[in-house]
Image (cartoon, rainbow, N blue to C red):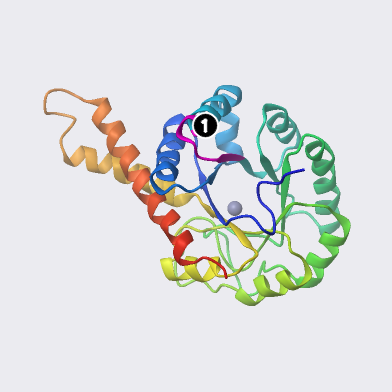
Amino acid sequence: MNKYINADSQQFFAFNVWNIESAKAVMDAAVQSGKSLILQTSMKAYEQLDKEEFITYVKSYGKKKKIKIFLHLDHCRKIDYIREAVDCGWDSVMIDASERPLSENIKMTNEVIELAKSKGVLVEAEIGQIRGQEDEISSVTDGIASIADIQKFLKNTDIDMIAAAIGTVHGLYKGIPNIHYDLIEQIAEITDLPFVVHGGTGLTDEVLIRLLSYKNVKKINISTDVKLAYKKGIEKSMQKSVMEVGGFDPLAVNRSIHDSIQNMAAKKLRLLEKGKAT
Ligand SMILES: [Zn+2]
């Protein structure tokens, strides 16, 4: 089976999108830079999505523009949603049972693997909890995955990508993140599975480039940055007074949002060249 992401594949940025417009803006960045990428949806966005219509659009636009676009369901806690995504043709899914005890996480992950693998859908799982910035983080080691847990997890599951808490968080960072690069290296020593970095927003270009210098880092998730670019696009169009001059112009607002998201994504994609693992 040809896995789109594997030990030898390229490195990817995965951008969170929530509708066709946000997906198109990110895909246009892929077209601009000639890079493949992953579009992913949170569970909440996925709930509101017209799945079949969405995937039809994404895949046909990618085909027309001759770029490879992969669709991923991120942080999913519901098996039913995963089953539906698998049936609809999503390329990969993430089962997030990381808040459960390790044994339950393993059990739930195996359930997902059973229903996904037969359809060629890849499975990402999380060990240790990647927090949101809003969560109370009491110490630097809080939530960081232990190598023993990772080993046990890998021994008992057959996942395709591994996400582990290394000190990155979802949302915005309040201070300088304490990233455990050593853990990325330790994981590379025990497995050649693609490693997924969550919480890519707010990391400086230097940090992203350093992360990309690890050969096993194959996917870096960018979510909050897409939302911020969306907001910036609206604000910019407001400054141009599209609301008043010649009447309200929704197309101008759309264009401004599109360009703002595309520019942000294109900037990240350029880092793939700079950070290329050797
Ligand atoms: Zn995440």
Where is the C terminus found, in terms of image quarters? bottom right
Q: Residue furthest front?
A: 66
Q: Answer with left or right where residue 245 lies relative to residue 133.
A: left
- Magenta stretch: includes residue 184: no
The number of callouts visible is 1
Query: What x and y, as percent, mark residue 97?
Result: 74, 50
Residue 212 in sight here:
yes
Residue under the image location 84 percent in, 47 percent down: 110
Residue 69 in the figure: left or right of residue 6: left
Question: At 68% from the left edge and 32% from the top edge, which residue is drawn?
Answer: 85
Q: Quadrant of residue 80?
A: top right
**Which stretch appears magenta?**
62-71
Split into 4 quadrants, where in the image is the N terminus? top right
| Residue at left offset 43%, top offset 71% | 206
Q: Is residue 69 magenta?
A: yes
Task: Give the camera-side residue of 135 and 130.
Answer: 130
Residue topped by disc 1: 63
Crowd class of label 1 (few under 14; some 14 to 19; many from 20; radius 10 Å): few
Q: Quadrant of residue 218?
A: bottom right
